Image: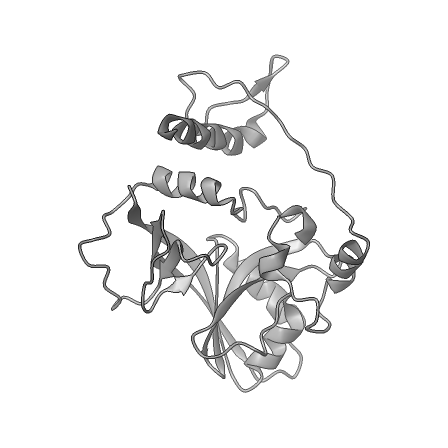
Amino acid sequence: MSAFHVTIERDVITVTGSDAKSYLHSQVSNDVNSLEIGDSRYAFLLQPTGKIDVVLRITCATHDRYVLDMEPGFGEAALARLNRFKIRVRAEMELSGQVWRAIRSTEPVRIDGALRTWSGDGRAWDVFAPNVGLGDSIPLGAALDYDAFRLECGWPLMGLDITTDMVPAETGIVEHAVSFTKGCYPGQELVERMDSRNATPPRQLRVIERTPEMEVGSPVVRDGRSEEHTSELQSRLHLVCRLLLEKK
């Protein structure tokens, strides 16, 4: 289908207060100070060592209210990380879980009231406002349509393609989530050093033979041993890759 929408779950942290902008700017990898009302951009929230706590998107609702959204299951850790360095800061933070709508299209479209997402090329939008109508021209899609489109766009998912053991340079989205002119933030040293030295992290590629009966959750067996800790990730990727091959 040329365009579709699906429902997605997001963990959302709302940050309000006179210090909301300056504090977030000091904590994340991207530039918050230059955000205008309605603007949004991705950023990494990093450990001081440079490893990733979470990938999030920051939206400027007003100049003293910011909305941070991320993959479900990472909100509590992100909130704890933000509160860790919050000393004499006039900003309140509230965590909630929300159900959004994700609109994906093979061609660039414009969805008023929605947030550009992923690479920002106009083919992917997220809607969090309940009063934004989609009309009848954008049908409901399936979760596998969403996964297949995400892989076609090459956008990694926190918790699936990106883990807390990784550093930003391993994700492929540094150009979307890092500012190299914004000033200091926790974890910046590693990010800057790898960029200045053109350092590339090691990458590991595994090829798995997929059988017709494989589905999400099937065990992956190597040398007669089941690798249960990677089965969901690998079988899900193979299921989506099969769909991509069938479309060609």
Q: Residue furthest front?
A: 107
Image: 172 above or below 83: above
Q: Position of residue 175 (x, y in %)?
A: 62, 58
The quadrant in which residue 23 appears is bottom right
Q: How is the image coloured?
A: one colour
**Residue at 57% in and 79% down:** 21
Q: Residue at x 58, y 59 (%)?
A: 176
Report whether residue 127 is seen: yes
For the residue pair 198 and 77, the one nearer the viewer reads as: 198
Residue 220 x %, y %? 54, 22
* Quarter containing the N terminus: top left
Residue shown at the point (62%, 74%) measured from the top left: 25
Residue 167 can be seen in this image: no
Instruction: Tell me where residue 121 sits by quadrant.
Output: bottom left
Say which quadrant the C terminus sits in.
top left
- Left or right: 20 in relation to 133: right
Query: Which is nearer the eye, 124 or 102?
Result: 124
Count all numbered tags in the image, as a single digit.
0
> To which quarter of the image does residue 178 belong?
bottom right
Residue plotted at (41% across, 31% down): 244
Q: Position of residue 163 (x, y in %)?
A: 61, 46
Residue lying furthest bottom? 18
Q: Is residue 16 above or below residue 136?
A: below
Q: Is residue 241 left or right of residue 227?
A: left
Q: Residue furthest top?
A: 224
